[in-house]
Each structure stands twice: as structure tokens, then as C-alpha cells.
């Protein structure tokens, strides 16, 4: 086998121009596939970070049945925001912070606006947060706020679409109206502290309200509808979520960010699917190139195969020799391509890619990277694929009859 | 017991719809240590006969082919490959060296196929290289050698497995006169010193002059399968020596 492997290496290097062209094709293809995957990894990582550190937290704790009834009775499934419950969650290894919240819906009227034609009232969806504790769970939420935004116990922050609809100014007086948990309408006054960008397309009428104000508005003093939880390592998310579930007991349900925002998982799934299709197409084209090179090699070396058979090489060994050559070609091409892709992702990761996704007003930072699993997978696919696609040329070489092969037929 | 024993060997090629007979029932025995030449005009069946003896091609069913007393009819491809590796050496008109291997590797290649012990092989390759005059070029590639040197490599490769018989198809056809002479002397010496059996197919009258036995072929048959004749006898036989 060593002798055949050594010969395979030399045979690959024998027709240098053709080998270089084949290797270049494989390497460029894998560089492209690796580069695309690297950028996509960075984008998805950025989306995940945005979800976890920007709005959702790594996981959320609700009263059991909350998510199933979120559209009908979100406030009736509230719970006391007591220290005992928070301590139970914080006691779980890996949990770093907990922030109480209330999700509610209401309507908004501004008393003074820049626009004569501003609407009288608009419905909105609000997240009520504790200005201090929320920073420990979703610090990036503040990045969504425009630069001069003030957010404290008396100021609300409006989504930019909502603010634009009203022509809202700083410190405009806002009247919040919302039904409490019993259905009775209540109102509270607040000041507009500023605007915030939507993290996802379609988030038009949103607002962030201080928790204390929301509790007064909804007549829910000391009560909340959810706890947002931050953890130290998202790669252990599922395990930590299980432990939090066990800690809070059956009265509560715990959902990870991916369960809370399945549409983001779906988007990532679609991205991965498209990326995989592109990778497979690239790989097929590369492997057809390898197969063509191997077929030409067999045709050119017929007499040589005959000679090797004459001195005792078996059909199996002939096949192994050509498959080893394909393996060497695939491995060298994959190594070159992965080196190229690593270099590109390294450079891009160092600089970062800053862009604003379509339909979003928020710029995101993407830091491309390749995972070890992807690198190993590409290497395996290139090597295994090269061998697979060279089965026919190798088989053809092995079926030559020595007497005809020696005559070059 | 003869080293090679052929009885009623026939071979027919099919070209399109036409059957072309190449051998029409050849009976031939070759003893160990012979230095035999198969001669005959082009198309007489010399190369076909050597291919069958060398297990590179199969005879039509019906005849008998024994190598060292062992009947070879019906062997599968890999058994024939193994027999070629162990018992038969080949010297080709175009040398047929493997271009990516250097001289040493070309010589030892057949032994590597049977996973021979490295230490013993190294010694044997060096002795052979010395005997055929290749010591100084052991690390050269075939494209760095002259025609004569290449044929010496082919001879060393044919002998390295210590075969029972070496088959040489027109071994001097691509060499100049002086080099041909050297190669012939080398093969004669190896025949005498090592007792290696040589069977040539050739048009070269110089080989015929040196042959201990000449087998004449015409139209797929042996004209005289047993005659031991020296070159002088056949030099004027009217055969095609071109």
C-alpha cells in the first residue's frame, strides 16, 4: 500500500499543468463554499446574539400555559415578582442574570406632536422592563435606542415607525391606555424618551415601557408575566434550560430563545438549506472535474497499466492505485480550498462586515467563522467524493487486459 | 520435466465479424536454462505465442499449457498475475519502465507487489544493478537514461523476482547496434551465470547467432518446434530478418 500511495502522489504531480488546473478548480470551489458558509455562520451568530442579548434573553420563564394563551389572556397568567423565585433561577449554574417583564398591548395618544395630521390614537405592543435589571440580561437592547434616548421610570421609548407616525418629540406627553388583567381600561401619563429601531422586519408598532409604570397601568403592582434569563455559555443552553425547569417546578414553563422565536430558526434553516444546495452543486462540479482528470489519466497510461499488470499487479491493486490518486487530488484540493476559505474568513472576521439587512433599520456586525465540524465535513466530502467519482475510471483501468494494454489499446 | 510445455495451443482473434487465427495448434517444450529464439515473419504468431506463455493472454480452450509441471488453463486473472509476478520476467521492446519511479524503484517494483522483506530486497537490487551496470544511476528517473540503460533496468526488473523464465519481445529493436550488442552479451552472461531461461521473439539476426535453440514459426504454426539450431544454420534460411 505504501508503494502504491507513493506512486499515487507522484502520478498526481506528473502532469503538473493538468493537476494544477484540477486542484485550482477544487480549491476555488471549496474556498467559495467555505467563504459562504463562514459569512453565513457569522450572520446567524449575529442574529442569535441579537435575539439573546437584544430582546429575548437566552430563555424566559412564564406561568405554565402562558405561551399557548399569549394571544387571549396574557395578563391573567402573571405571577409575583418575588425574590424567592428569582433566587431559584439564579441558583442554577450558568445563569448570570434575571430580569422581570410584562408583555402587554394598549393604545397610545400623544398630546403634542410636530404633525398636524398625526393620528389620535394607535394600538401598540409593549414590553415593560426594569431599566436596571434588563441591562444585565439584554444589554444590546440599548443599542436599538436612538442616540439621545432617555429611558427611566417615567419615559417610554417608541418604535421608530410609531414615533414617526405621531411625529413624536422628546418629552412629548404620552397617554397610555390598556386593559388590566380584569379587562378594565386604565390610563397613565408618561414622557416620550426617544425612539428605537426594529430588530426584525415587520415590528412596526412597538414600545418599551418602564416596568413600574406598566405595573401601575395594568394594576399589577409587584407582579410580572415573565422572567428573562441570561446565561454564561449559550452552547449549554438546553442543559441550563432543563435545570431552570427543574428549579422553578411545574407551575412555570421555560422556553429557550429558539422556541420563543421559531421564525428566526426557520430563517436560519432556509439559509442553511440554500447554502447546502450551493455547496452540493459546487462539490458536484468539482468532482466531475476530478473524474475527468482521472479518466484522462487512465487513457494516457494504458501501456503503463499493462506493464504493471505484466509484472504482477492485480486488478484490485490497479483500482486502488487510481483511487489513491483521486484521494490525493481531493485531499490536496480540499486542503487548498479550506486554507483559502480560512484566510478569507479570518480577514473578514478581523475587519467585521457591517450592514443593514433589508427591511430593517438596524445595522448588524457580522464576524464570519468556520466550525471544526464544517472543516472536517468538507475535507471528508471532497476526499470521499473524489474517490467515489473516480470509481468508474479506476474500474475501467482495472478491467484492461494486459495484452491489449501493453499494445496501448 | 520441461519448464514450459505447450500442447495443441490455439488462438483466434475476432476482428469485427471475422475470426483471425493466430496460432493453429502449437506444441512446444522449453527446458530450464535454455536461450531460445522464436523467429518468423511478421504475423507468424511469435508475439501471440510469447503473450500466451507470459500469461498476458489466454489460449483458446482445448490445449494444454504447463509451467514447471503446473497446468495453467482456467486460472483467473489474479492467479495469473501472481504467477507472472513469481515465475515470469518480461523485457519489452519499448522498455516499459514506470516513469514516476527511479531506477531502484523500477527494479524492485515487482517484489514490492508481493510485500517482500526490505533488507533482502535492497541487497538483491544492488547486486543486480551492479551486474547489469546501473550502480551509478540507481536514483535516476527513466527519462534521464539512455536507451541501453533503460533496457538494462528492464532486464534487472525481469530478473529481480528470480523468475523461472524471462520473455523478451524484440529486446533490441529500439537500440543501436553497439548497445544491442552490449545488451545481448549481458543476457548471455546472465543465462550462463544464473541459469536464467530466456525466450526471445525477434527479427534480429545477432540474437539468432547467439541462440542455443531457434524455433521457427510461420502462419501460426511451428515450422520446426524441436530443432536446436545455431544462427549460422538459419541465417540463410530465407526468413524475414529485417
Image: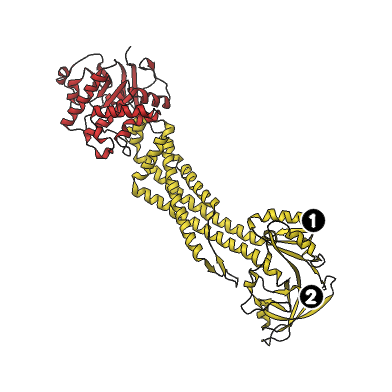
Chain colours: A yellow, B red
**Picture layout, residue B60 above or below residue B175:** above
Q: Quadrant of residue B136?
A: top left
x and y percentages locating residue B155 in the rendered image: 27, 28
Residue A249 numbered tag: 1
**Picture layout, residue A229 above or below residue B131:** below
Q: As rendered, which of B160 and A36 lies closer to the eye? A: B160
The quadrant in which the C terminus of chain A is found is: top left
- Same chain shared by disc 2 and disc 1: yes
Q: Residue under mark 1: which chain is it in?
A: A
Mark 2 vs mark 1, CA separation in Å: 31 Å
**Picture layout, residue B240 above or below residue A339:** above
Please state if A62 lies on the left or on the right of A332 as rendered: right
Disc 2: which residue: A178
Please state if B217 lies on the left or on the right of A39 as rendered: left
Please state if A272 lies on the left or on the right of A214 as rendered: left
Q: Quadrant of residue A250?
A: bottom right
Task: Name the residue rendered at 56%, 57% in the picture.
Answer: A274
Amino acid at each position: 500500500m505504501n508503494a502504491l500511495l507513493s506512486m499515487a502522489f507522484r502520478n498526481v504531480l506528473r502532469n503538473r499543468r493538468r493537476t494544477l488546473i484540477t486542484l485550482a478548480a477544487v480549491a476555488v470551489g471549496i474556498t467559495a463554499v467555505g467563504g459562504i458558509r463562514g459569512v453565513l455562520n457569522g450572520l446567524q451568530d449575529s442574529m442569535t446574539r441579537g435575539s439573546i442579548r437584544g430582546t429575548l434573553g437566552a430563555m424566559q420563564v412564564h406561568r405554565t400555559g402562558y405561551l399557548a394563551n399569549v394571544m387571549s389572556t396574557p395578563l391573567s397568567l402573571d405571577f409575583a415578582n418575588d425574590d424567592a423565585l428569582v433566587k431559584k433561577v439564579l441558583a442554577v449554574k450558568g445563569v448570570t442574570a434575571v430580569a422581570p417583564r410584562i408583555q402587554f398591548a394598549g393604545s397610545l395618544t400623544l398630546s403634542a406632536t410636530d404633525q398636524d395630521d398625526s393620528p389620535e390614537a394607535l394600538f401598540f405592543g409593549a414590553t415593560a422592563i426594569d431599566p436596571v435589571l434588563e441591562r444585565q440580561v439584554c444589554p444590546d437592547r440599548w443599542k436599538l435606542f436612538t442616540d439621545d434616548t432617555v429611558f427611566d421610570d417615567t419615559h417610554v421609548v417608541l418604535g421608530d415607525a410609531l414615533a414617526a407616525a405621531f411625529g413624536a418629540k422628546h418629552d412629548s406627553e404620552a397617554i397610555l391606555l390598556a386593559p388590566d388583567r380584569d379587562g378594565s381600561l386604565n390610563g397613565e401619563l408618561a414622557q416620550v424618551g426617544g425612539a428605537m429601531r426594529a430588530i426584525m422586519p415587520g415590528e412596526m408598532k412597538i414600545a418599551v415601557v418602564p416596568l413600574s409604570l406598566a405595573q401601575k397601568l395594568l394594576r399589577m403592582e409587584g407582579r410580572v408575566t415573565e422572567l428573562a434569563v441570561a446565561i454564561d455559555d449559550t452552547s449549554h443552553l438546553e442543559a441550563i434550560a432543563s435545570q431552570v425547569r427543574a428549579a422553578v417546578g411545574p407551575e412555570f414553563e421555560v422556553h429557550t430563545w429558539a422556541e420563543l422565536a421559531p421564525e428566526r430558526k426557520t430563517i436560519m434553516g432556509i439559509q442553511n438549506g440554500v447554502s447546502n444546495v450551493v455547496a452540493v452543486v459546487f462539490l458536484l462540479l468539482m468532482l466531475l472535474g476530478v473524474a475527468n482528470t482521472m479518466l484522462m489519466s487512465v487513457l494516457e497510461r494504458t501501456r503503463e497499466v499493462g506493464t504493471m499488470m505484466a509484472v504482477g499487479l492485480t486488478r484490485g491493486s490497479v483500482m486502488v492505485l487510481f483511487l489513491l490518486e483521486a484521494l490525493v487530488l481531493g485531499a490536496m484540493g480540499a486542503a487548498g480550498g479550506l486554507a483559502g476559505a480560512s484566510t478569507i474568513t479570518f480577514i473578514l472576521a478581523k475587519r467585521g462586515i457591517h450592514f443593514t439587512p433589508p427591511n430593517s433599520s438596524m445595522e448588524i456586525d457580522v464576524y464570519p467563522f468556520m466550525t471544526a465540524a464544517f472543516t472536517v465535513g468538507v475535507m471528508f466530502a471532497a476526499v470521499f467524493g473524489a474517490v467515489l467519482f473516480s470509481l468508474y475510471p479506476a474500474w475501467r483501468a482495472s478491467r484492461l487486459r494486459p495484452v491489449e494494454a501493453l499494445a496501448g489499446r | 520435466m520441461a519448464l514450459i510445455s505447450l500442447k495443441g495451443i490455439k488462438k483466434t482473434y475476432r476482428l469485427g465479424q471475422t475470426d483471425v487465427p493466430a496460432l493453429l495448434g502449437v506444441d512446444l517444450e522449453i527446458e530450464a536454462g535454455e536461450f531460445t529464439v522464436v523467429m518468423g515473419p511478421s504475423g507468424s504468431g511469435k508475439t501471440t505465442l510469447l503473450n500466451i506463455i507470459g500469461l498476458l493472454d489466454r489460449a483458446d480452450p482445448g490445449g494444454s499449457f504447463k509451467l514447471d509441471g503446473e497446468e495453467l488453463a482456467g486460472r483467473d486473472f489474479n492467479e495469473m498475475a501472481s504467477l507472472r509476478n513469481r515465475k515470469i520476467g518480461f523485457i519489452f521492446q519499448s522498455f516499459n519502465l514506470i516513469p514516476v519511479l527511479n531506477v531502484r524503484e523500477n527494479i524492485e517494483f515487482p517484489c514490492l507487489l508481493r510485500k517482500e522483506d526490505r533488507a533482502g530486497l535492497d541487497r538483491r537490487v544492488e547486486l543486480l544493478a551492479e551486474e547489469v551496470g546501473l550502480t551509478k544511476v540507481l536514483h535516476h528517473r527513466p527519462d534521464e537514461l539512455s536507451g541501453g540503460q533503460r533496457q538494462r533496468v528492464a532486464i534487472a526488473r525481469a530478473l529481480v523476482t528470480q523468475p523461472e523464465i524471462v520473455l523478451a519481445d524484440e529486446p533490441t529493436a529500439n537500440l543501436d547496434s553497439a548497445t544491442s550488442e552490449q545488451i545481448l552479451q549481458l543476457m548471455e552472461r546472465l543465462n550462463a551465470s544464473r541459469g536464467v531461461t530466456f525466450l526471445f521473439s525477434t527479427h534480429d539476426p545477432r540474437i539468432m547467432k547467439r541462440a542455443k535453440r531457434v524455433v521457427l514459426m510461420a502462419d501460426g504454426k511451428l515450422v520446426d518446434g524441436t530443432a536446436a539450431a545455431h544462427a549460422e544454420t538459419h541465417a540463410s534460411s530465407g526468413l524475414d530478418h529485417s
